Image (cartoon, rainbow, N blue to C red):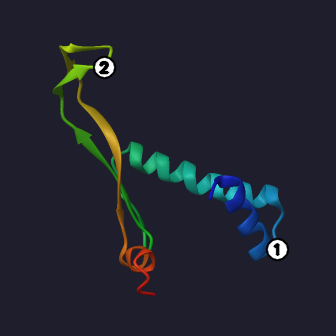
Amino acid sequence: MNKARLVEIVSDKFKLSKRVSEDIIETIFDESIKALSKGEKVNMVGFGSFMSKVRHARKGVDPRNPSSIIDVPETKVAKFKAGKKLKDSINNRI
């Protein structure tokens, strides 16, 4: 599924225009990104939680020159932890 398909589903289910549905979905994405950027956890009950974590600096192999070791700087990454309902659904327990 992609964003366009999600817009279609929301539009049909709630009898909204595609523009309004897209605005709602875009707002959810934007606000989630803002919260994660501030280090806040985004919890969607039944679906899962998004959080930002720090990936510490480390040594790595240069993909252009495998014999060369490079320093990979510390960076923030987004992590996702699936909720119980999502896990159960994927494993056909619902």
Please give the name of the residue rendered at 44% of the width and 82% of the height, measured from the top-left corner.
92
The residue identified by callout 1 is 15
Q: Nearer the viewer, residue 60 or 19?
A: 60
Specify few, some or many for label 2: CA neighbours under 10 Å numbering under 14, 14-19, or 20 or more.
Answer: few
Please give the name of the residue rendered at 21% of the width and 21% of the height, measured from the top-left corner.
61
Question: Is residue 46 rendered to the left or right of residue 13?
Answer: left
Q: Position of residue 20 (x, y in %)?
A: 77, 59
Q: Nearer the viewer, residue 78 or 67?
A: 67
Q: Nearer the viewer, residue 38 or 83?
A: 83
Q: Which of the 4 image quarters holds residue 74?
A: top left
Please give the name of the residue rendered at 67% of the width and 61% of the height, measured from the top-left corner.
6
Q: Which of the 4 image quarters holds residue 45?
A: bottom left
Specify few, some or many for label 1: CA neighbours under 10 Å numbering under 14, 14-19, or 20 or more.
Answer: few
Three-letter code for the amino acid on which mark 2 is drawn: Pro
- Quadrant where the N terminus sits is bottom right
Q: Which of the 4 image quarters holds residue 17?
A: bottom right
Of callouts 1 and 2, the N-terminal one? 1
Q: Position of residue 8 (x, y in %)?
A: 76, 63
Disc 1 + disc 2, Cβ < 8 Å = no
Camera-near label (1 vs 2) is 2
Three-letter code for the amino acid on which mark 1 is drawn: Lys
Depicted 81 relative to depicted 47: above or below: above
Q: Nearer the viewer, residue 22 or 61?
A: 61
Per the image, label 1 sits on a secondary structure element best described as loop
The residue identified by callout 2 is 63
Please give the name of the residue rendered at 64% of the width and 52% of the height, measured from the top-left corner.
26
Q: Position of residue 90 (x, y in %)?
A: 44, 74
Q: CA distance from mark 1 to mark 2?
A: 50 Å
- Quadrant where the C terminus sits is bottom left
Question: Is residue 84 rendered to the left or right of residue 21?
Answer: left
